[in-house]
Image (cartoon, rainbow, N blue to C red):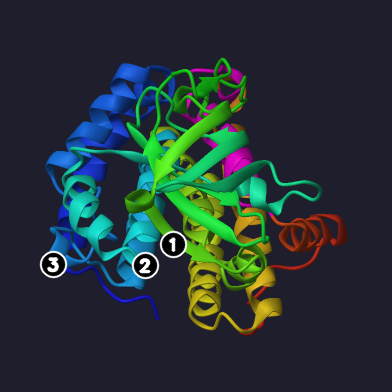
Amino acid sequence: MVPAMSPPRIEAHAFLHDRIRPRAGEIDRDVAALREALDEMGRLGLLGLRVPVEFGGKGLEPVAFRRFQEESARCSGALAFLESQHQSACGLVARGANAALKARLLPKLARGELRSGIAFSHLRRAGPPALTAAPAPGGYRLDGTLSWVTGWGIFETCVSAGTLPDGRTIFVTHGLAESGHLHASPPLDLLAMAVTQTVMVEVKGLFVPEEDVVDIHPASWIRENDRFAIALQSPLALGCAQAGIDAVREEAGRRGDAGMAAAAARLEGELDRCREAAYRAMDEKEDVEQGLEARAWAIELAGRAAHAAVLAAAGRGNVIPHPAQRLWREALAFSVLALTPQIQQAALARLSLGRPPIGASGTI
């Protein structure tokens, strides 16, 4: 069973539902509103959920953090997408081998005084390394391309991964602003969450001192990380699914439509089963098949719940500013977040084979 909320999560839940959800439409369209929401999270300490207590963070256990990510996506997909980048950067630094870097950065990251993006999805691409890291006196010199960097102009720093001459993966932290060494493309023309300012960054001769090295991993790091993290993005899709169900239920209440309310109840029952399966898969990481099935289910359910929200809104659901239309776009975005070939195949199989909901018979 997914445990009940603990006090830090109650505080976070209240903030998300009282302060963020009513402004979700504005946050989705306005960079200033998104930045303000991120600032509020920093003032409340909610940007340090994955930072250990000794460095000024909340030190949330994994299950509590997953529940927060669900609620974040339920209330604002754009904010959830953006803050999850920062939380991931915090996690990378906290788990890294550089003790001095932890002491220097983590308190600032936890308070939101310094905000960080991440850039390592390029490690999944075949072919020559997208970003190389060559040893240089006192550190390393980076050259290449960061193909996906979210938060340009919002985050001040970034935790990026490069490939060393011997094939190992090095994670470093560096500034994230236009310079003679960093040049960003215009924001990508994304269908969903374009407000998050996602860009491609050309890196030319960027020097990173040894003290800013987060960690060095074997060349196989990305494959091992993806293998054990198959289900870890599920909470964002689950939160999106819950938001779709919320929208259907609210529309049913306005219309007094019992059939619509029953549809929302059926979707909520399935969401409960999907959540149980996903959380179990996140804990039992060695069971790859279980993780793939749970992630595929979460992706599909988010899409169906968002589609239900559009249908419940009828013609108004085809108007871009309508909340149902935003949820539809968010479901698409969360379906491809951290998408590996294995997850892609599992999700396509579920969609194309018309499988019954996993867990309908009490099993996954």
Question: Alpha-carbon neighbours of circle 1 within 10 Å: few (<14), some, or many (≥20)?
Answer: some
Residue at the location (68% across, 69% down)?
292
What residue does disc 2 label? 95
Instruction: Give percent across and percent down for residue 286.
Output: 61, 84
- Camera-nearest residue between 111 and 122: 122
Please report the residue visible at 19 percent of the width from the left and 41 percent of the height from the top: 42
Drawn side of residue 103 relative to residue 228, left or right: left
Judge from the rendering whether residue 249 lies leftward or rightward of residue 217; answer left or right. Answer: left
User: Is residue 333 magenta-colored?
Assistant: yes
Q: Position of residue 298 (x, y in %)?
A: 60, 59
SS at mark 1 in the image: strand
**Lower sequence index among marks 2 and 3:** 3
Residue marked by disc 3:
54
Foreground residue, 216 or 258?
216
Q: Position of residue 334 (x, y in %)?
A: 57, 45
Q: Is 345 on the left or on the right of 8, as rendered? A: right
In the rendered image, the quadrant that contains the N terminus is: bottom left
Q: Disc 1 marks which amino acid?
A: Asp
Q: Residue at x 45, y 37 (%)?
A: 207
Q: Position of residue 329 (x, y in %)?
A: 59, 32
Give the residues drawn in magenta, as a range: 317-339
> Nearer the viewer's eye, disc 1 or disc 2?
1
The residues bearing labels 1 and 2 have C-alpha atoms spaced at a distance of 9 Å
Foreground mark, 3 or 1, reads: 1
Q: Which residue is mark 1?
A: 215
